[in-house]
Amino acid sequence: MTTATGTTAPTGAVGAAHTRVEGLAKVTGAARYAGDIPYTELAHGWLVLSTIARGRIGSVESAPVLAMPGVLAVLHHGNAPRVDGDYTGPLGPPDPILQVFQHDRVPFAGWPVALVVAETPEQAREAAEALVVHYDEEPHDVAFHAGNPRSYTPEGPQAETSKGDLDAELAASAVAVDAEYTTPEEHHNPMEPHAAMARWDSGRLEVVDTNQGSKFVADELAKLFSLDPASVRVRSEHVGGAFGAKGTRPHQVLAVMAATALHRPVRVVMTRRQMFSLIGYRSPTAQRVRLGADADGRLRALDHAADCRTSTVYEFIERSADYGRSMYDADAHHTVNRVVPLDVPTPTWMRAPGEAPGSFALESALDELAEKCGIDPIALRARNEPDAGPVSGLPFSSRNLLACFEEGARRFGWADRDPRPGLRREGRWLVGTGTASATFPVLVAPSTAAVTAEADGTFTVRITAADVGTGARTALTQIAADALEVAPERIRMKIADSDFGPAMIAGGSMGTRSWGWAVTAAACELREQLALGGAIPPQGITVRSDTTKDLATLTAKERYSFGAQFAEVAVDVTSGEVRVRRMLGVFAAGRIINPLTARSQLIGGMIWGLSMALHEEAVRDEASGGLVGADLAGYHIAANADVPLIEADWVDDPDADDPVGIKGIGEIGIVGAAAAIANAVWHATGVRHRDLPIRPDRVLLAGTTAGAEPAYGEVETPGVEGASGVEGAPGAEGASGGDRDA
Amino acid sequence: MALSTSSAITLNVNGEKRTLPVDHRTTLLDALREHLDLTGTKKGCDQGQCGACTVLLDGRRAVACLQLAVAAEGRAITTIEGVADGERLHPVQQAFLDLDGYQCGYCTPGQICSAIAVIEEHAAGWPSAATTDVRPEAGVPPLTADEIRERMSGNLCRCGAYVSIVQAVAQAAEAEQAPFSGPVDRVDTANTEVGA
């Protein structure tokens, strides 16, 4: 392993910057992802998706397609093998989309209706596009909006929390905020499309996949196809991004079906467009936040009601209102998540599910409250620091939010900030800064690991971890090295193979913590055995661990990571464009295993926040029920030119209850980032943007309706000023832009 | 008369002549991946929107998904597998490795091929939308962070590695002024392969 520091101490690997173990393979193109591995006699499956949003499949006209060159099979609801979806996995019952081709109902646009399998991808694609499917169409409803009468509060204790008398505390408040915020449908879009190869090999089902947990996928496939779990092997060596979208999805099920039917290896790869209806996404949200406070900003009332949307076949809740349950206390405190089922694809977990949209609403509302109270946004948050969990009453394992704000404010230069909005003008640009808090739960799940002392002096670690770009493979190498008290170069880290046994998936910011715990347990025991002396036999000495019992001893606490987000934006008053000029995130997120890759991951999360604030929006067409422009041209994710210099750093915050001190860093980077940007846009322009993304047309429209916005304040009509202010402005091409909204 | 729908073509890939039969519908991307086992070139969208399949065609960057294989005959094709000098990494590869200019690595081959061409385009005096003075007499503009961001914007990275990508491209551009430094530390990749 190369190291950025150039030192290879025998211990002390954790905390030192290490380049990625698989880095050379990734920069040379040698790293093989799921769709990259050749197989003899490989056949190619191409999905056909429904073109209607609700109804029944009348007929699938297979015969003409089967006569096309190279076509081997057309699978559909009339001929597909039966699968059993009647089970509950670790994440609940399966999404019905996994029971592919089991009935003729179409619950949304883009539902899988057929799979065409052919000798080559070109043949499969042409045949799939030629396949005629007749439907009996029924009326559909995809319109999501606040206050839909079909919305309901889901069952279970987590849907709603309540304490105190909300109306009384709001009435007694000197200052109040009552505002609605919306976030749009957002899609994961990992760069690597979902791909799976399935084949039968000596009586075992082998799947080469791109996923967040190979044992998890193997167990689901075993249940769906009624197989002995030991007869299913799933591997997923390299994963080109996941973000919550790479659990079990229809492509793995279909590859298995086709391989079983054809007795040869079959690979199914989704197209980019197909991913928009098959892999899940983040539900749009409509959130109402009511805050009541004393004049000094102390919260008396906090009410967060969040509406989200799910499909008609599966209830998935985007738990936006959970955010305030750990963050801010109030005498009266109420949070509720509601959902409305519509004729749309089922949403799923997407990076910081709940916290990402929830923090946008609540952290924006806090900024509005700070403005109304006339106190600094950071001071407002400091004034409302709880001593214990606002809802649970439990103590925090650690809560270093204010340390993040202190360090962040110092580095960002927050003390010099004039709080008044709409005052800073550079040519046609209005400039402002904003801040927001961040938090994310710290969780851990049982995992198993095996560590082997080899006769040649190396150590082999086996664990069904997944490295989805997080750097988990490298972090676990460092953790194993320290636990074994050897140099990282002596560790061989083998991951992402279901044969290695049960382990947590790469999700919930829990992966490295859960796996690190298991690796540490096995490695420490092995080190103790080796300390007794004796030769290592040719097969090595292996110690296995299972953290199930250890984790059961963890006491109930409020366990969270925290962070402080800062952003500076410039708003072009002539075009409405918002540019982020710089961002800083300071996090208290446990012990940082690898500063090099951790910084990348935190910055990546912040870029997701930038992208969420300004760019990302899937537009659903109410007439067709499908998306408009479901591809990477129609759905904009932040490109290089959208992203300024972004810095992420951390304060010392080791978790005392974790053997390595880990909390988890996969998701907290996005939390609060969009709110910090929206708050900065207000500071720049004096206009509150409560609907994401903050598109140019929204900025311009807000400017023209300034009279309706009491906070707009100091800013004159943009177009008039813009025409003169444009001269000499950096990047100004001419004064014509100033005419736009004059 | 039935028209033939496939042809035997010869592609010049990474300095090597490779003859293969291809369906006329086959893109250069699929020819590389499915026929020549050069899977370092990635498919992210298959419609020219993401840049993951960026290769060098006669030294200039192109997305291989929008190029038919039959149309690439006679052109010099360089893929990620062909940019290193034997065991020595290209300075762009080395910089991506050292500065963590990636996370999942899927867009990385395209980013690296793109960056190699960006550095050459810039050195040759090609302006970009970020170039403030495009008059011929202004000469080659400095390769600022804004120039790199603009020129690299055809390559999407969902992990959000842009900050270190910009730093890596800048470092590589500087390194290319000097001759290659010593051989790269080789990393044991044996445990990162999935065998067929």
Image: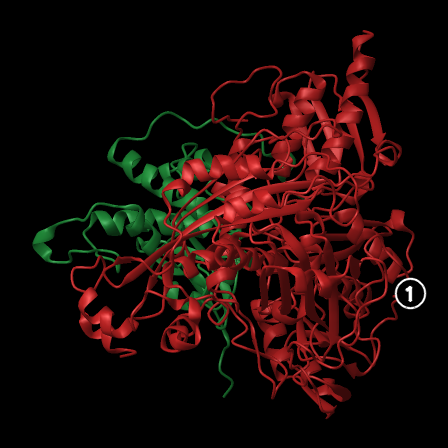
Chain colours: A red, B green
Q: Residue furthest top?
A: A533
In the image, is B93 to the left or to the right of A232?
left
Q: Residue at x 73, y 60 (%)?
A: A335
Residue A186 visible from this viewpoint: no
| Residue placed under numbered mark 1 in the picture | A86
In the image, is A312 to the left or to the right of A242?
right
Q: Residue at x 42, y 60 (%)?
A: A681
In the image, is A196 to the left or to the right of B94?
right
In this rendering, the count of numbered labels is 1
- Residue A409 position by quadrant: top left
Q: Determine crowd level at label 1: few under 14, some 14-19, many 20+ residues with C-alpha closer than 10 A.
A: few
The chain letter under disc 1 is: A
- Nearest to the observer: residue A12 or residue A386: A386
**Horizontal and vertical percent position of residue B128:** 25, 58
Q: Residue at x 66, y 25 (%)?
A: A491
Residue A686 visible from this viewpoint: yes
Tell me if residue A404 comes above or below residue B114 in the rendering: above
In the image, is A402 to the left or to the right of A538?
left
**Horizontal and vertical percent position of residue A570:** 34, 58
Tell me if residue B93 comes above or below residue A327 in the rendering: above
**Three-letter residue code for mark 1:** Asp
Q: For the C terminus of chain A, give its image quadrant.
A: bottom left
- Nearest to the observer: residue A560 or residue A353: A560
**Horizontal and vertical percent position of residue A513:** 71, 36
- Residue A196 position by quadrant: bottom right
SS under mark 1: loop
**Horizontal and vertical percent position of residue A269:** 64, 63
- Nearest to the observer: residue A49 or residue B147: B147
Q: For the N terminus of chain A, give its image quadrant.
A: top right
Tell me if residue A524 comes above or below residue A142 in the rendering: above
